[in-house]
Image (cartoon, grey):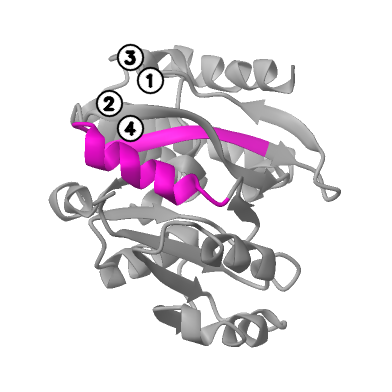
Amino acid sequence: MQGPKISIITVAYNAQNTIERCINSVLQQSLKNIQYIIVDGGSTDDTIKIIDKYSTNVDAFISEPDNGIYDAMNKGIALATGDVIGTINADDFFADNDVLYNIAKVFAEQDTAIIYGDLDYIDPNDKVIRKWRSGKYRKGIFNWGWMPPHPTFYCKRSLFEKLGGYKLDYGSAGDYELMLRFIHQNNINAYYLNKVLIKMVVGGISNKSLGNRVQAMRFDLKAMKNNSIFLPIVTILLKPLRKIAQFF
């Protein structure tokens, strides 16, 4: 298959317990036409020591303080040379060894600039506790609280050049705002790959406390208002309700 080159960006900070599994899941991919970039936020544990073990397989590595996860992702995007860019965070890993091959195949065969898929949340014992099944994108569906799982989001590098990267003033909704901007606001064609692409360990900054959840909702609302969501207040109520079905 003559597919696109894919740049994979891993963002890490004090991730000594998970970073090695993440790295190995990238290196074990059957698709070899990839660029692997790791952006570390200046870890103080053994994260950098673990990354150094794989230095010959990492194409670009930065370790320095940043302004959060989306600033780190933007640094990775600036280093990317692939036709397609995707991210896999230090706590996540690919569901199988053919994920990137399947993504590259779709980009090679379909007229699309964006691909997304499905995701499983797992507990520390690798038990699946929540299933995020995206379904096909339909124009306007963002108005009803829909969004794809960002860890499965891959797009052509040219989109970042044309529409910009992650905006840092949306807090934990930086990924949501970017997907809204690309797909909903700018009508970029998005293709649903009906496969589990990523396994994600449960837990996240926006869900650690009631205060964080309220702040996350405020950031979501800001992203909606600035990206032409029809009824932001209704949408912000529907968005968490969609998560309930993911537990069944």
Instruction: Give the side of residue 124 with respect to residue 244, left or right.
Output: right
Secondary structure found at label 4? helix
Mark positioned earlier in the residue sequence (2 or 1)? 1
Residue tagged by mark 1? 142
**Real-space Cα separation, disc 4 to disc 3, in angstroms:** 13 Å
Kind of residue at badge 4: Leu
Q: Is residue 111 magenta?
A: yes
Viewport quadrant of the C terminus: top right
Q: Looking at this view, is 208 or 200 the one in front?
A: 200
How packed mark 2 is, by other alpha carbons closer than 10 Å (few <14, some 14-19, many 20 or more), is many
How packed mark 3 is, by other alpha carbons closer than 10 Å (few <14, some 14-19, many 20 or more), is few
**Real-space Cα separation, disc 3 to disc 2, in angstroms:** 10 Å
Mark 3–mark 2 CB contact (< 8 Å): no
Kind of residue at badge 1: Phe
**Real-space Cα separation, disc 4 to disc 2, in angstroms:** 5 Å
Mark positioned earlier in the residue sequence (3 or 2)? 3
Up/down of 14 relative to 244, above or below: below
